[in-house]
Amino acid sequence: MPDWNDLRCFLAVAREGSLAAAARVLEVDATTVGRRLAALEGELDTKLVERTPSGLVLTDAGRGIRPALEQMEASALAVERRASGEDARLEGQVRITLTEAFAVDMVLPRFAPFRERYPGIEVRFLTDYGSLDLTRREAEVAIRLTRPQDASLVARKVGEIAVAPYASEDYLARRGSPDLTRGLVGQDVIGYTDAAARWPEARWLAEHASGARLAIRCNSLLSVVAAAGAGLGVAVLPCLRGDREPGLRRVAPRVDALRRDIWLVVHPDLQNNARVRAVLQFLTELIQRERPLLAGEGHSAPSGRR
């Protein structure tokens, strides 16, 4: 019977398309993935993947066994979740998936009390704009800015993030204050590219900054912040970051249409896990305590159409 670790390597290769990418997902080296894949092919006496210029692709045999292996994986993960869900120990690992910006601006600067309260819990912050899969145990807890579509997950709204236009003092001294009622005519704006081009901020700029020039495009919030700080143009930013960034000034009211909800998400099998529950409680208290900062309250801005 094939080794389950060999089967997991095959599934990772099937999903990721290369040994290196599969190795990153499995947190091993590519040599180990290649060795286990070869061992599985030897055990089954058949070729499962082929090398092509664009990466590894499944053979007919590989495609044939993949659904059955994914069912095996789902069953194994369910067993792990249910066993872990009954764990009453305040020790062990908890992985949180969230965006890098939210980790840097909100969670990490305020996380020291958790470490003091729960020294036995090792928290791993997985900062990525992609969505790690809680069902497949890629993380235990997620902080999302949109409500998850997967009805099998437990999601709780714990706060909101306000968004507004910002520009640097240097930029405003050179170009003057933007006028949203005229489509930011005569202004430069910082736009978005790649996956970030699908963000609501990108759509809002397309609608409300029709008179502006596109100065530069970025694919992450942190690069948009850097571009705005360098005086490259007007940027649409979470007030959490924009209000606290040295040299930036809010140049219009908060945009209600861009307000984001903050959701804490967990798989139901892990709700009773003591360490996961401790993390969820701490994050809930932290986010609710910082509600004024997240909501962008206490900062005035010029009036203008939202």
Image (cartoon, rainbow, N blue to C red):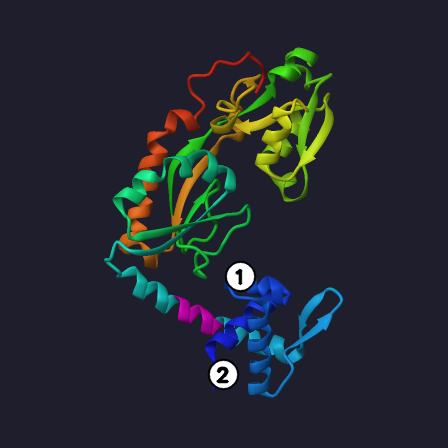
Q: Residue at x 68, y 39 (%)?
A: 193
Tell me the element at label 2: loop
Residue 71 pos. (x, y %): 47, 72
User: On the rendered structure, is 220 left or right of 244?
Assistant: right
In magenta, the rendered stretch is 71-77
Residue 275 pos. (x, y %): 29, 53
The answer to whether mark 1 and mark 2 are in CB contact below 8 A is no
Say few, some or many: other residues with alpha carbon within 10 Å of mark 2 (under 14 / 14 to 19 / 20 or more): few
Along the line of sight, the residue nearer the viewer: 304 or 239: 239
Residue 291 pos. (x, y %): 37, 28
Q: Is residue 205 rendered magenta in the image? A: no
Query: Residue 43, located in which quarter of the rendered image?
Result: bottom right
Return the disc, 1 or 2, that comes first in the chain's sequence: 2
Along the line of sight, the residue nearer the viewer: 111 or 96: 111
Marker count (numbered) = 2
State the predominant SS element of the stretch in magenta: helix
Quadrant where the C terminus lies? top right
Tell me the element at label 1: helix
The span from disc 1 to disc 2 (Cα, nearest Å) is: 21 Å
Query: Residue 85, located in which quarter of the rendered image?
Result: bottom left
Q: Which mark is residue 125?
A: none
Along the line of sight, the residue nearer the viewer: 133 or 28: 28
Say few, some or many: other residues with alpha carbon within 10 Å of mark 1 (under 14 / 14 to 19 / 20 or more): few
Along the line of sight, the residue nearer the viewer: 149 or 144: 144
Q: Which mark is residue 2?
A: 2
Question: Quick check: 37 above or below 135?
Answer: below
